[in-house]
Amino acid sequence: MQRDSRIGANFIINATMANTHQFQTEVRQLLDIVIHAFYSDREVFVRELVSNASDALEKLRLKQLTQTDIYEPERALRITITTDEEAGTLTIADSGIGMTQEEVVEFLGTIAHSGTKKFLEAMKESKGGTQDLIGQFGVGFYSVFMAADKVEVTTRSWQPDATPVKWVSDGQEGYELDEAAAETPRGTSILIHLKEDAKNFAKGDHTRYILSKYSNFVGFPIDFNGEHLNTVQAIWMKSKKDVKPEEYEGFYQFIAHTESKPLSYMHFSADAPIVLNSVLFVPEENPEAMGFGRCEPMVSLYCHKVLIDSKPEKLLPEWLRFLAGVVDSEDLPLNISREMLQDNSLLRKVAGIITKRFIKHLEGVAKNETETYEKFWRTFSRYIKEGVVTSWEHKDALGKLLRFESTFTEPGKLTSFEDYVSRMKENQKDIYVLYGASRSQLENSPYLDALKARGFEVGFFTEGGDQFVVESLMKFGEKEIKSIDRAGLELPPLEAQPDQPGLDDAEAEGLTTWVSDTFKDRFSKVSTSDRVTSAPAIALQGEGDISPEIKAYLRAMGQEIPETHPEIAFNPHNPIVMKLAELRTQDESLATLLADQLINTALLRAGMLDDPAKLADNSQALLEKLLNK
Ligand code: ADP
Ligand code: MG
């Protein structure tokens, strides 16, 4: 008997254990942050739960169109919200897709949502200094514990044979899981026991006010304390003239889970060749700039107001991943699967049309709202540049959106290729650019000499990867874009300046032939040139050579680097060069050291000196020789 009772006791303990679940460590960390959130951020939990209810209803609506066996097929799709001031509770219920027991364990016990995971990582990195981010980025379901000291979730899945489940937690260590009453209706009901200092959410007026901010963007009726609250509308299906700016803002805040305003938005409708309705928003901040990593797609795909996929991977091109919004096309098949989404030719057409329209929209912003465009450029330039490199079809249109500084702009002021072309001189054939680390570095570049002398503008490109971007653009309109550190730049001749001392043709010829012979195969060409006036010599990239930037990239990738043969151009009017021309016949070994010094310095300035130690060794040898003389 004794033995039996022991087994019985064990059994009881195990049974209780089976009902008590620990939160995953990450969830506990998140809850710790959430519970200590700023008081003012608290109301976002209402938005998060309404958004989940709406998602659950959207999912059920899609199931209704694609599945036949659904529990309580006649039950109306709606959200029911009630406050109970006396009990100090708030209940948010929906008749949506519901959850099975396994789903509850996964969704409300771990961090299943990748956005929340990223949020947590960013939080850890900033060591708690980003409390206010909770208001900026929805942390999903767990945000309920900003206001609750106990939460009861009762849910029944749409699957006819699923058992209804009840989940109860105080947001500390874990939760209790039990079977719920058999009569539990389809969907999810969340009963929130409010904290002492959050009881205002149990007041009808307060919560009604919070709901009023976005209830009209929810695609299902909301009943609030027995009263119908919202007008169900799909803002993107309306005519532009019927939507107020505040409505766009409110819609953005609801779908992007944010309290901030969009920087810009585009509302676009078309009937041919495809029926399309779309609203796209540019956020105020770069979603990838805050340590959140690569952002998830935030443009949802609808088919005539039915949500097909809230995060379609391949809807818009990658470089547009910073956008939030909605794309709705009536022409899509409703039962389209995720796999089909990936290579559906109709979707590709949709993407093409929308991308084109969005680029046009940005062009309009650049023209009519210059300040907004500047802000846009400073925040999102990397995406536009990515577009130039990756999207052949839209490359030329994207070229118009690029902004950069130039020899003609004041520091910090930006210009465009369009403006550049409008300023081009009559005898100027090409567009000139120069790549480097900063404007101040580029401003001192001897490459500018020849362009300055002719009054030609040079665009400065100073961000990593710029060279790839501009080189893949190649042209702007009919004009070729040329990097001025390249050999073979075709420039109109300069007017001769007769009084200037310098090497005559024979002396120049003698010097360059000697340098070529002395440094045998190092250079593809040695010349004297008016491309340099401020320094003794410049190194030019040989025409077929890969650029220093690409060379560095290959080196970093551990790849073999093709041999390059730069060109050296001497300034025939420079006193050191003139001296060198004399010296080579008088003291050849000193002349060789001097020439090497001039050449290495030029290579170094051009970023083409592979081994800087050479320059140091050579200058030491040169100094020794001069001192012994
Ligand atoms: P997200 O909504 O971004 O996925 P949440 O933390 O808000 O993240 O919710 C986590 C998951 O819990 C949801 O993806 C969903 O699967 C499930 N869930 C939350 N609320 C509901 C609900 N009312 N009905 C059905 N499932 C829900
Ligand atoms: Mg959510």
Image: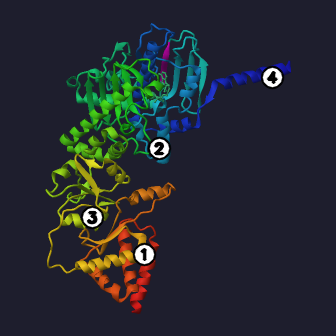
Label of residue 6 in the image: 4
Q: Earlier in the sequence, mark 2 or mark 1?
A: 2
CA gap, disc 1 to disc 3? 23 Å
Q: Earlier in the sequence, mark 1 or mark 3?
A: 3
| Quadrant containing the N terminus in the rendered view | top right
**Residue at disc 1, secondary structure:** helix
The crowding category of the residue bearing disc 2, from other C-alpha atoms within 10 Å (few below 14, some 14 to 19, many at least 20), is: some
> Which residue is under mark 2?
122
> In the picture, residue 366 is in which quadrant?
top left
**Residue at disc 2, secondary structure:** helix
> In the picture, residue 358 is in which quadrant?
top left
> Which residue is under mark 3?
443
CA gap, disc 4 to disc 2? 49 Å
**Is residue 561 depicted above or below 77 in this figure?**
below
Q: Is residue 291 visible?
A: yes
Residue at the (44%, 24%) spot, across then down: 52
Q: Earlier in the sequence, mark 1 or mark 4?
A: 4
Residues in magenta?
186-192
**Residue 144 included in the magenta stretch of the image:** no
CA gap, disc 2 to disc 3? 38 Å
Name the front one of labels 4 and 2. Answer: 2
